[in-house]
Image (spheres, rainbow, N blue to C red):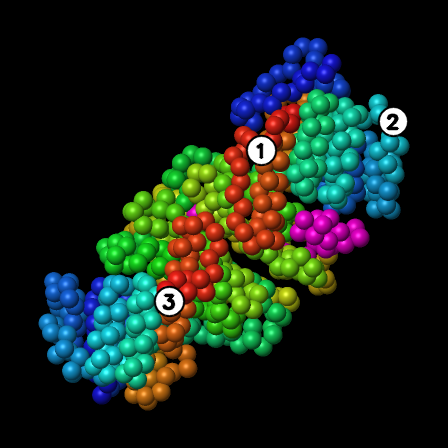
Amino acid sequence: MNKNPFPPNGGSPLSSPRLKPGASRGYSVNARLRILMIGAGTMGSVHSRAYRRLADAELVGIVDPYPLGQALAETLNVAHYHALDDVADDAYDVVDICAPSPWHRPYVILAAEKKKAIFCEKPLALTLEDADQMLNAVHRHGVRFSVGHCVRFFPEYVRAKAVIDEGTLGAIAVVRTFRGGGFPTAWNDWYASRSLSGGTLIDLLIHDFDFLRWVLGPVARVYAQSVLPEMNRVDFSLVTLRFASGALAHVEGTWAHRQFGTRFEFSGSQGTLVHDSYREHPLNFTTTGPTEGVALPETPGLLSSYDLEIADFVDALRTDRPFRVSPDDAYQALRIALAASQSAQTGAVVTLEPESGSRSQGGAQ
Amino acid sequence: MTRIALLSSAHMHVASYLKALNALPEVEIVGLYDEDKQRGQGFASAHQVRWVDRLATLLAEADATVITSENARHRFYAEQSADAGLPMLCEKPLATTLNDALAMIAAARRRSVPLFMALPVRFVPALSQLVKAVHGGAVGRVLAMVGTNHGQLPPGWFLEQTLSGGGALMDHTPHVADIMRWVANSDVVEVFAEMSSRMRDVGIDDAGIVQMKFANGTFASLDPSWSRLGSFPTWGDVTLEVVGTNGVLDFDVFRQHLDLYAKGTPSYRHLAYGDDMDAQLIAAFVDSVRQETPHPMLAQGIDGLKALEIALAAYQSANSHRPVKVSDLLAATAD
């Protein structure tokens, strides 16, 4: 059974190649998918609640060695575990990894070895070596794997992609994006360590790198400037991307502002498309007191963008269709982010090899 | 009475400067000279300005000049003004090459006449407030700046390399580069740029992204793209974001406008109601000529040179795909 039942698929993410009858997937599409959450921080909490809203998924436990994990497990009335190995292998089908970024690699590899389907928060990893090991494990064990590039589920971004794909703006020439707010506060202040979080260039801007690549195709050249890595809880970065198509993008990422927000502007030969989250709010309120935590972009709707993301992940598992975010998508976004980080450190321009040669094997869809 | 000569009507800003001059007391427009006779006569008759077909005649009657020619001809008019002993206000960019720019500054210095630059954004009241706040430490140490100067595709000679010296990067680098130098209180030492001509495909750069490093460690970016089409509610923008260790400041020159929804194209338009920065610029220029003392807010030739260096470094970077040190640019000129 070492044949990969989920070969990489180059088709549309919405096309649906079916599994051959009898192929092993490690879980039954007829029963509810049993989800094990790893990490009870901001994203772990958001994802846990998203699974609980689904009829065809069941959150069975939370793995987190810290008191936060027990608190969330109690709140949601599910089991709490200190480590993944504490959980019986047959007690769950899917692992959702929301641990801080440096722990993505060990958890993904362990979950792959246990033949579990995996969802991993972004960034995939903080180095290409780690990413290669992770995707190789996923490929070797033939497990399904997607990564939390949630911007692909934000309705304003989805709508923008549709407008651009329809040709309304003509050929895209120059793009601006903005993302950020205050400095994130989390467990052990891990965001304040560049080596643990990757800072704005990797942790934050990987969202825009992924979205822009989704819309505009491969990136050819990267230049970036950023504050000194040892700055005390202030981070700000400016990135210039040149796409293989010839389009340019100016990507701004900040943990030096206050209120979280995002903006984008696409200009092409036929028009300009603009969004500013600071203005597009159906509900506004302000309160006294400081704000802390990791800011979550929210676009109020019947379902949050995270609900949509998790629902799509579960649906793709149940219907055996490709994920909207493939392992290679996450890998390519990381390549762009690491190129930006390298450019900011060296002051030099980084030219990216064509994507086809960037990895010997694509990961399993 | 201060007598002003208009030198060339090639640049559309001449109309705005003329309007500002006409509004000032004790100012006389002695006439317009334009080497393109048809263009000059057309402008003169449309704006009720006296047409003078000999440059020397016009200069002999004037106290100062306003140079609104094609970029590549700034040097000619500046040298003529300097030789006639006349202070001048030169449209940006100062020139299209460092050699021309240095020659202009030298000519003015030789004749002891001031060479002022038309960089009106300095006069926007909100910018003065921004600079005061930043220099007073309101946002802590300045880490970075993000600027834009978007615009529409300009007509005619702007798209001819030999006359304009370049496209969007040449046209729209000076304003924001100049105010960034003021805010940072430092000069740009290195530039990286990407450019393209995908926006309008008119054979010259019409979009770009410029990144800069300042001597004091501040870094910045500028988007000078001609990326505003006729369907956009306004011609363009000038914006600046200042990111400091303790806070952020946002500046948007034209965010004093009404939103108009009415018949026409575009059906949604911005109607500006902020102070007219060109009027402030022209008043400061006339005042400087009268007092024979430079107005402290007026940009001078050296400021124009600094802005030009950034634009020229940007082109060299965009063509070589690597960051360019401004000092290397100057060294190459000196060779």
Packing grade of label 1 (10 A; few <14, some 14-19, many >=20) is: some
Is there one chain holding both mark 3 and mark 2? no
Callout 1 secondary element: loop
Give x and y (percent) for residue A353. 53, 37
User: Residue beneath label 3, please?
Assistant: B334
Q: Is residue A266 visible?
A: no
Q: Is residue A250 visible?
A: yes
Callout 3 secondary element: helix
User: Depth-wise, is mark 3 or mark 2 nearer the camera?
Assistant: 3
Magenta stretch, residue numbers: A174-199
* Marks 1 and 2, the one that precedes in the sequence: 2
Residue at the extreme front of the image, as rendered = B335
Is there one chain holding both mark 3 and mark 1? no
Rounded to the nearest whole Å, what is the CA distance between mark 3 and mark 2? 75 Å
Subunit that carries the residue with mark 3: B
- What amino acid does circle 1 point to? Ser
User: Residue beneath label 2, please?
Assistant: A88
Residue drawn at point x = 71 percent, y = 23 percent = A140
Q: Is residue A181 magenta?
A: yes
Asked if marks 1 and 2 touch (Cβ < 8 Å), the reply is: no
Packing grade of label 2 (10 A; few <14, some 14-19, many >=20) is: few
Along the line of sight, the residue nearer the viewer: A19 or B223: B223
Residue A212, placed above or below residue B220: above
- What amino acid does circle 3 point to? Ala
Along the line of sight, the residue nearer the viewer: A336 or A42: A336
Along the line of sight, the residue nearer the viewer: B12 or A225: A225
Subunit that carries the residue with mark 2: A
